[in-house]
Image (cartoon, coloured by chain):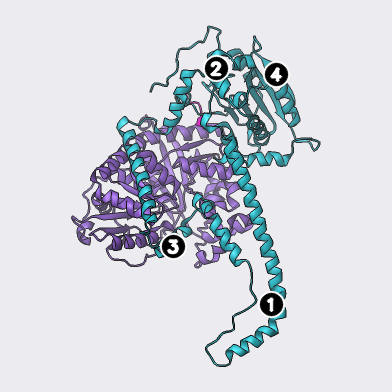
Chain colours: A purple, B cyan
Amino acid sequence: MASNSNAKNQLHLTYVVPRYGQEIIGGAENATRMLAEAMTRFGVAQVEIFTTTASSIDTWANDYACGDEVLNGVTIHRFKVDSGRIANFAAATRRMLAAPASLTEGEAQEFIRLQGPVSSDLLDAVDACRHDALIFYPYLYHPITQGLMRANVPTIMHPAAHMEPVLLLPVFQSVFSKVDALVYHTDAERRVIESRFKVAQKPALTLGMGFEHFRGTPGDIGLRLGLQDKPYLLCLGRVDAPKGTTLLVDMFKEYKTRNPSALSLVLAGPISIMPNPAPDVYVVGPVTESDKADLLANTSCLVSPSAFESFSIVLIEAWANRKPVLVNSLCEPTLEQVQRSGGGLAFHDFGSFEVALNRILTDGELSTVMGVAGHDYVMSRYQWPKLIESYQTFISRVIERSR
Amino acid sequence: MDKGHPKESLEGTGKFEPELSGARVQGYLAEASASSEEGQSDETLEAIAYVARVQREIEAEVAALRAEGKYPPSLVARIKRYYQTLLPPGSATALRDFDEAYRLLDRVAYIDIDVPTQSQKPGVSQIKRVARIFIAWYLNYVAQQFNNFSSNLIRLIGIIDARIARLEAKFDETDFSAVDLIGVTASLSAQRELAAALATELADNKGRMLVAECGDGAILALLADQGRDVYGIDTRVEYLDQLEMRRLEVRNSKTLSHLAKVENSSLGTLVLSGIVDRASISDRVAALFHAKRVLYQGGTLAIVSSGLETFMAPENHLESDLSPGRPFTPQTWAELARRLSFSHVRTLFDANSNHFVVIANNTKIEARLSWLSESAIISAARDPRLEK
């Protein structure tokens, strides 16, 4: 088994990710850290991280110091950001994203550069890296698109992609053509990438993501918010209009008007775009792991309103707590997870949101069935030992193939 | 899990092991419907079915409430606007909105130069009217050009829509997915000598290799044992499970849909089997087009097939009756390959001449091709059916 590997058999892997750290909540970055730490914990790889000194995707400012540090057994090398995200990025690139496929490769490269972060030191480090493999995560940013082109060892990418306008930028075809192998979160993500870039012949693995049970003492955020013994919906992750949180708050407000009750909605995560204020809605910003555990343990249902996810760790966390979920059916990967697990329902407009929510809140048996089905699904698919074993086998095969 | 088919090996008996019998068909069909539920307990499957039923009930209830007018139009419009901002490009919902978008575009495509001149301020209305008269010559000229452009554009979109609708209708007629019988009468599972001969033929080939409908992995394992960079695809999960346990690289995928997602000139060898026996003629030709596209110059195509006698054998009656096509002869395959500018076409036969492999090298497409063209290959690669 993987954990029995000795140092001589260990892989030496380097992940390239735009930002990395315990404080960083982004889905892909968090997934990178969980995976890197699990690989180290199970003793199958010596893992290093090439990342920038940035912590915010809004600016990519140099928040961390340059240099090396070790976090949970993983060695992190931080490189200075030469240029971050331009101030008016969204406005400046709106026209570009209106017709992304029509841009030239040069214009698309410019989009990636304006989006940031650009770090020439990081790219030089990638160039010089002679470890067993370089693993890039996710597909979207400059260190990945440029780093992949400069890699001199086998390359693997976790695209963490979903169908979104930026995926149509012409710059990514050469990136996906160059990479040696791909690791996907879900089959839905795999279908999107293989159809878009015609890379079905490349070695690929649909891995998913493992999870950790929270082992500490749950926090008391429910008490602090005055939610004890009151039903509430929970939405975890970045609070941002493209993530569907503005839509969710608006629909929740309408739902409460039509269905008066004590129900509340809690949005927990970094705030990028604040939704319109509404009664019984708590936008609490980022929360600690213990407070998250408290919120998950006592929620009636976790809602994932985003249409743009390649995988949803928060669904896994909700199911680990035997909680039902409600997802936006526009998001194929989360819908696929729900349909395969039986752990929740989906909405596609206000009507289906309202009726599905009523069923979840009033039909205790249904909620229990969905919570248990989700829990079984997580236990059968997303346990770290099983995932790490197949991941290790896959990476070894890719490295062997490149020799 | 009981697959509903015999497992005993006929290896060494000299008999061809039938891979599709009546019982097997039932097993495969049941398996196909349960493929995404592999490894789940009965309780979990029941829960999934229950939740799916609830989801359908929700949809029905919403439809009833909508019909009763329970959702104010302003609410529906507001939520829809949010959704429009979240829609991934080309999503199904966006496609459903085509008619409405087309109608709206048609309505706003015409520029009216008859600018309103009303005003509440005294005298302004007259000034506006005079101004309108003075600039009418200019506005007329500009508006006419734009209106010409927009009316032609609307017409063009209408033509494209009609053409797509025709294609969709054609697709509905030719979708054989309901009777998608993966039979592989020509599998090399029992044709060890032929498989070995093929492996020898491919011994000097470079690059990545794909064995499409790899079955029990006879050829796949031979190539992997030679240290080749090879992977296989199939949809029969019982084979895939066995092959994965043998550490062979395999995917659960259909041949055409997989080939449609393979990069141009990215494979050194493509071994086609199964589909070449029982698919429709157009699908078989599509597979050849894809082979031409995905193989790099000098790459090798191997078509593993069988004679009509094998196809019509009693143990394969269901497949031969229900399959949209029947096997081509080696001569036909060889001719098709030559017409697609494959070169060095040769055929290997088994001892009884019931099974054969047509091997051909991929060479540059020649301009003199009479009935095939590069654009046809590209069209085949973009066939919307293959994206499903």
Q: Are marks 2 and 4 on the same chain?
A: yes
Instruction: Tell me the kind of residue under disc 4.
Output: Thr
N-terminal-most mark, 2 or 1: 1
- Disc 1: which residue: B139
Q: Position of residue B71 (x, y in %)?
A: 37, 60
Mark number displayed over residue B347: 4
Name the chain under label 2: B
Q: Is residue A117 left or right of residue B369?
A: left
Question: CA gap, disc 2 to disc 3?
Answer: 56 Å
* Residue at the image point whose x is 47% and y is 25% from the top: B28
Q: Position of residue A162 (x, y in %)?
A: 48, 49
Q: Nearer the viewer, residue A281 or A224?
A: A281
The part of the chain drawn in magenta is B246-252
Question: CA gap, disc 1 to disc 3?
Answer: 35 Å
- Asked if one can make out residue A142 in the rendered structure from this viewpoint, the answer is no
N-terminal-most mark, 2 or 4: 2
Q: Are marks 3 and 4 on the same chain?
A: yes
Is disc 2 in contact with disc 1, using a CB cutoff of under 8 Å?
Answer: no
* Residue at the image point whose x is 48% and y is 23% from the top: B239
For mark 3, give the secondary structure.
helix
* Placement of A132 over or under A223, stated as above or below: above
Instruction: Tell me the kind of residue under disc 3.
Output: Ala
Name the chain under label 4: B
- Disc 2: which residue: B316
Mark number displayed over residue B276: none
Q: Position of residue A126 (x, y in %)?
A: 53, 48
Q: Position of residue B352 (x, y in %)?
A: 64, 9
- Disc 3: which residue: B77
